[in-house]
Amino acid sequence: MANLKEVRNRIASVTSTQQITKAMKMVSAAKLKRATNAIIQLRPYANKMKEMLANLSASLEESNSPFIQEREPVRVLIIAVSSNRGLAGAFNMNVIKAANNLIAEKYPEQLRKGNVKIVAIGKKVQDFYEKRNYTVIGNNNELYSNLTFANASRIIEDVMNGFANGDYDRVELVYNQFKNAAVQILQTEQLLPVPRSNSQVDTSKQTDYIFEPSQEQIVEQLIPKSIKIQVYKAILDSHASEHGARMTAMDKATENAGDLLKALKLSYNQARQAAITTELTEIVSGAAALSNG
């Protein structure tokens, strides 16, 4: 039977842990509300921009934009979005696994030649790939301290300039898309060059725009902005997913701590009962010995 003092110490330790996990769950729930509002507000704008770009570019046979020029993917850049902190279940490791699978399945030859580079948004991804001697470009861990479109755009502008200059031939984006607090959907998207739609455009749904100065110039301006919006949306999705995953993980940890406390208290009561029984037995035996003497 477990020692009473040891069981009491364990009960105190688990109770303290349960209080911490419960507090972390409440903090994550509050942050999740703000993060969810941000991504919900952005999604209609991002979707409308995609629709507008599709309508405008549908009739363009060619474009001079460097961001839609297909090239042989000799040099590849992976943008992986994680969090700066752990205690969020498998949230961060799922992104890392998805990025690793993407590299292994599509770019093994480029990896062997050292032509795969990483842009990490989040300390967990940054640390993982730096420890494994990947070429990790920049440090973007402070982005979450002030998550704005302007700050996110600075990261993407460097990536876009690198692609336009030929430093990268393919840019892929890996992140968790927010669905709800319990569900995050891993997404792997080709960011650059901008994928061309293979589907036929429904001309009955096309809007009749008046172009000023010209359709081509408008499309040239919309493509870079659309790329920035797409990445910013991915970061906001990941940010909301992080808090949802952490809230769920801390809720489960709190529940597990409660179950462990029940087991420990049962063990404590059994040990205490055994100790009392032993003491009574000793007293009875001593009294019997005295009476027989």
Image (spheres, helix red, strand yellow):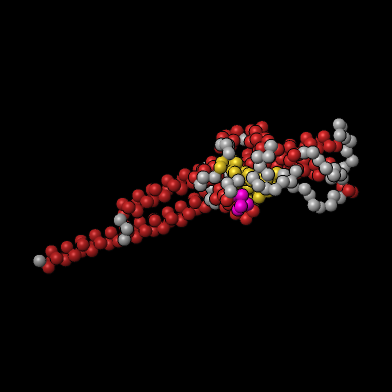
| Percent x, y of residue 238 | 62, 44
| Percent x, y of residue 239 | 61, 42
- Seen from the viewer's position, the closer of residues 120 and 151 is 120
261 displayed left or right of 247: left
Residue at the outermost front position: 113
- Seen from the viewer's position, the closer of residues 36 and 172 is 172
| Percent x, y of residue 269 | 35, 58
Residue 149, quarter of the rendered image:
top right
Q: Which SS type dominates the magenta stretch?
A: helix
Residue 34 visible in the shown view:
yes
| Percent x, y of residue 163 | 68, 39
Residue 40 visible in the shown view:
no
Residue visible at 89% across and 36% down in the picture: 210
Residue visible at 42% across and 46% down in the picture: 16
Residue visible at 79% across and 38% down in the picture: 64
Residue at the outermost bottom position: 292
Q: Quadrant of the N terminus?
A: bottom left
- Seen from the viewer's position, the closer of residues 8 and 288 is 8
Residue at the outermost left position: 293
Residue visible at 85% across and 37% down in the picture: 215
180 displayed left or right of 224: left
| Count of all numbered marks drawn on residues in the image | 0
235 displayed left or right of 67: left
Query: Is residue 188 highlighted in magenta?
Result: no
Residue 37, quarter of the rendered image:
top right
**The magenta segment:** 107-111
Q: Quadrant of the C terminus?
A: bottom left
> From what the image shows, is residue 221 above or below residue 260?
above
